[in-house]
Image (cartoon, helix red, strand yellow):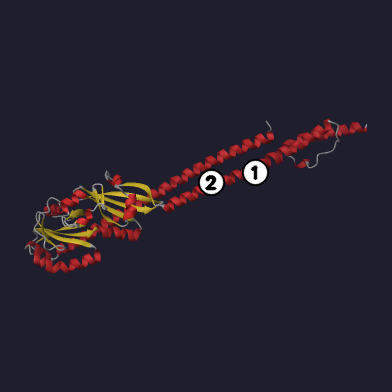
Amino acid sequence: MRFRRSAPAALIATVIVVVAALTLLSARLFSGLTDAVEKSQFELMQAIFDTALRDAENKALARAELLAALPVTRQAVAASDRQALLDNFAAMFAGQKERHSVDQVQFHVPPATSLLRLQDPTLFGDDLTRFRPMVVAVNRDHVSAKGLAIARSGPAIFGVAPIADMQGNHAGSVEFGLDFGAVLVAMKSAYGLEFSLFVEEKSLRDFATAIDPAVFSEQNRVGRFVRMETTNGALMGDLAGDADISTLNEPATYARDSQGVPYGVLLVPLRDGAGQSLGVVAAARDFSGSRAAAGRSLAWQACLAVFAIVILAGAIIVVVRGLLLRPLEVVVNRFVGLSSGGASVPIEGAERFPAELQPLVQLHDRVAAKRTAKSQA
């Protein structure tokens, strides 16, 4: 074994192992930070959706309660005067539909019978008990309610308020339904998210009898669900399929690529006021920023690791060979020269040798001095 080669090699190998271990540890740390960032993004997506849905429900309920408090509403519903309701509120509904995405307004009489649909005045008198539990509850408990439901014209976000006659007796109820698709489009515009709304096909066929039959096309069918609304059909088709939503019972998150771009996907189950499953909303957000940052971080860590190994390896070679082995080699060669009868001259630059080698230098000088004295005698 040659110390000149073995010692630097052992030290450099140790440096490589230590730097590689530190780089791996740093990479895992940054990976954990990336996961934490993406988790916070999922939480933000959930908060955005929950807030938007809650705001839509509150807006629908506020409109319903305002309309329910008007004397003309109370008198007309108590008298089941459909024409009075239509004359007073048809124009209002048209404006709300055009400017505020109000999809439907309906008046009911107990227990849950349709008195007037402003969006379809020719259809009335049908019993809503089987598929509108929220309307049944409001007319039973005389307390306002809000939430999701599938009405005759499709799914919407509803607010339902009780109506009392002029003597304070319960007379019926009124509901406002906001278009779900408009809420999704508004969230996309505000936050850059993509959405799809999936509704169970059986519920649509049973309850949404006035819905456009084209909704049930093969293009929109996803397992037992029908895709009712989407802000980007091609993208969301890649990110949320039948296998993802068919067994969903609680919010779920995952990451998936579409056309080489990573996305974070949030799935949220939808339920009506009675807790019955209505469908699923899928939300997606571009995660390329966090993934690219993680990739750049890994590349920089690798570059820094290589740089550190090169610098430390060079330092080891310089220290071991230049500051230790070279002075030692000079001293040894001088002793060899003395033993073979060479000239007895001082070692030049010996004062710069390490302190640990100075005893050898001094020994050499004493031996050289004695030999010189002996030769002169």
The single residue placed furthest to the right in the displayed view is 377
Where residue 177 sits, quadrant-wise, is: bottom left
**Disc number placed over residue 42 in the picture, else none:** none
Where is residue 291? Give x, y as percent: 44, 50
Q: Residues within 10 Å of mark 2 (few under 14, many from 20)?
A: some
Examine the rendered structure and indicate whether residue 331 appears above or below residue 94.
above
Number of callouts in the render?
2
Where residue 15 sits, quadrant-wise, is: top right
Instruction: For mark 1, give the secondary structure.
Output: helix
Left or right of 310 on screen, residue 218: left
Residue drawn 65% across the image and 34% down it: 6
Q: Nearer the viewer, residue 39 or 220?
A: 220
* Amino acid residing under circle 2: Ala
Instruction: For mark 2, give the secondary structure.
Output: helix
Q: Nearer the viewer, residue 260 or 87?
A: 260
Q: Nearer the viewer, residue 132 or 167?
A: 132
The single residue placed furthest to the left in the displayed view is 79
Q: Residues within 10 Å of mark 1 (few under 14, many from 20)?
A: few
Left or right of 58 on screen, residue 9: right
**Disc number placed over residue 314 in the picture, else none:** 1
Residue drawn 19% across the image and 50% down it: 203
Where residue 96 sits, quadrant-wise, is: bottom left
Lower sequence index among marks 2 and 1:
2
* Amino acid residing under circle 1: Gly
